[in-house]
Image (cartoon, grey):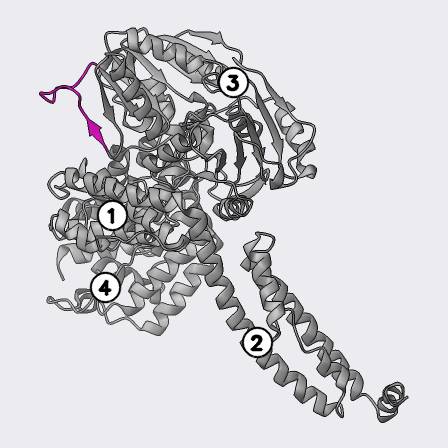
Amino acid sequence: MSFPRCALLWARLPPGRQPGPRAAVCSALRAHTGPFPGTLGRVPAVACASSSASGGSKAPNTSLFVPLTVKPQGRSADGDVGAELTRPLDKNEVKKILDKFYKRKEIQKLSADYGLDARLFHQAFISFRNYIMQSHSLDVDIHIILNDICFSAAHVDDLFPFFLRHAKQIFPVLECKDDLRKISDLRIPPNWYPEARALQRKIIFHSGPTNSGKTYHAIQKYLSAKSGVYCGPLKLLAHEIFEKSNAAGVPCDLVTGEERVTVEPDGKQAAHVACTVEMCSVTTPYEVAVIDEIQMIKDPARGWAWTRALLGLCAEEIHLCGESAAIDLVTELMYTTGEDVEVRTYKRLTPIFVLDHALESLDNLRPGDCIVCFSKNDIYSVSRQIEIRGLESAVIYGSLPPGTKLAQARKFNDPDDACKILVATDAVGMGLNLSIRRIIFYSLMKPSINEKGEKEIEPITTSQALQIAGRAGRFSSKFKEGEVTTMNREDLSLLKEILNRPVEPIKAAGLHPTAEQIEMFAYHLPDTTLSNLIDIFVDFSQVDGQYFVCNMDDFKFSAELIQHIPLSLRVRYVFCTAPINKKQPFVCSSLLQFARQYSRNEPLTFSWLQRYIKWPLLPPKNIKDLMDLEAVHDVLDLYLWLSYRFIDMFPDASLVRDLQKQLDGIIQDGVHNITKLIKISEAHKLLNLQNSSAESQSRLSGTVKSQTRRNHGNKALGSKAAGPLGPGAGEKSLASRLVQQGLLTADMLKQLEKEWMTQQTEHGKGRTESGTSSKGTRRKKKEPDSD
């Protein structure tokens, strides 16, 4: 037997059975073969705990740790060396040893010291047991220790080092927790922007309500500067400043996620640029920077972009425009950078009044009214009812293309146009100049997404109510004072209460992991999916009290969508940051298709895209067609967004932009005729509903007849078998008239029919049961009929 084999066996013997010079032999063995895991089995728990301490950090959420698969070893070309040195293992004995190991409290405590809580310990043990039981040949060291335990030459606890080694294989995060915490340490974000910290910036906060002139004063500074950048929350606002600046003789470029426009003929960058806040450069020096709607620094999904702009812009002067609720937070953040904040307060330029009466009926509408809804269905319903009254309305909601929104705004603002009513979502809250006399809240309940990514329906906040209500009676419009009310009388008191509440101060600013941080995470966890990497990053991250990590559900949704497509991590990260509406199936499938084409190294040409979207597209015939066209417009936006990140693979941006303009025109025509589309859609629904109603009536009639026969010809039951949409032509025409007049929708009609059928079925069952209870009872029920 070789020297290493002799020394190894010698080192494994319990202290009471070892020959004298064990230490010398072990030292010789380590010099020959290196350290072996078996000698770690008796490490004191205190030492383990101290070696794995995490510096007082919070315990990680281990439910996020997804175990990797470690395949059992097959037959080795060299044979089973462990069996040759000792003997083949008895799998039954080994299973008993492993079960005993699992049940030992000392092992569970030791595992916890190394970061294996009960959940991870159980998963690791199952994997470890399967690995040992299913392997044809084990590593020599573990084979020998198992053999020694079988012969009582070693203790079952001596398996722990091998178990721990296996646990770190399936949970690699255990091996690098401290490194991951350093990478995900998001404390002191001002230090991420050394160029900005090298400047002593002047911060001016323009605070005031809507229509107070705060943004106007900031833009005047921007236009008078030698160089400047405007950072806005919407493409519409960036376009507006781009046009105003160039109209004022100040050359200005435009930069959004989907568009780059340079005004200089040679393509050289202008000294001024208007951009969406996510696209601002934090390395380009400017004289003046304007960050609009700074209160959106608290936004659960996009707040990180305002934080980045505030801390990172390299400008001598930074002008912030927004609500007073953000003043305290901005002051605290700038204190950490050593910069003072000058606050300039503005008052509203025109008065606004909350009326003491609700609208109650659309018959009370006046020119200049804007009805604000928080769902598309409400917009469709209200628009249809307005059209029935012989009025024309403009429609604006979030998923419309920017060009269509502007066209509808121009139509509403045009004094020569017959359109005097606007129906809109809260998209009118910012980005559009509208001549509104009165804001009417159709409802005060709005769906929202909380910080955990959960959908909630609750009353609008004071900030939202003020933002929307402030659109009435703007200084630049023909109405010199504004009015606000509700559609329903019972909502009016709640609206007044909401508007009178003080706006809660903003307490934290959003942060977002960078691509570089995720790449470093992936280096330590190479086999972990991007979605799981994000979960672990957010869980490990540490932030100061003035910050929070933004919700990344949309990012994770895209990551899971394209997970099976072979892409490099950096490319995958870029695809996942593409802004898509995950409620649109066609947009989601398009992201998947674009990623698949990219992975095949097949450029997405203009001709390919035309075939994919089935161009040319027909004008919409109903609301569904209109929504489909909006989805196609979003797909073209996605192409343009990716074309600025992967120019070679998305080469035809200019052609796609021209195509998008044509599509915008088709959508504009559809929205212009939206009431006709709604009318057609409702007619189709009603037709389908009546067909299904006739079938239901036929089935119900058969049921009633059979019950009648069982009840010995009860005529009363049969006489009640006609429903609200029964065979009578007059009843059908009544329903049709109600739908056409906007007093009843197809959905309401369907619900009424369902309730009526349920009641009739229950009534029929009740009469059947009472009719079959006893002969005497039946006679008593027949007597009044015979009389």
Residue 138 circle label: 4
Q: Which residue is mark 2?
A: 696
Q: Are marks 4 and 3 in contact (CB under 8 Å)?
A: no
Camera-nearest label, 1 or 2? 2
Residue at image location 30% in from the left, 56% down from the top:
13
First to last magenta residue range: 259-271
Label 4 – label 3 distance at C-alpha: 73 Å
Dot placed on the residue nearer the N-terminal end, 2 or 4: 4
Q: Position of residue 734 (x, y in %)?
A: 61, 63
Residue 209 circle label: 3
Q: Nearer the viewer, residue 101 or 28?
A: 101
Can the viewer see residue 336 in this picture?
Answer: no
Residue at image location 28% in from the left, 34% down from the top:
517
Camera-nearest label, 2 or 3? 2
Q: What kind of element bears circle 3?
A: loop
Q: Position of residue 379 (x, y in %)?
A: 50, 44
Q: Nearer the viewer, residue 175 or 441?
A: 441
Dot placed on the residue nearer the N-terminal end, 4 or 3: 4
Q: What kind of element bears circle 1?
A: loop
The verdict on residue 450 being magenta is no
Q: Which residue is mark 1?
A: 21
Label 1 – label 3 distance at C-alpha: 86 Å
Q: Amino acid at mark 2?
A: Ser
Dot placed on the residue nearer the N-terminal end, 1 or 2: 1
Label 1 – label 2 distance at C-alpha: 93 Å
Camera-nearest label, 4 or 3? 3
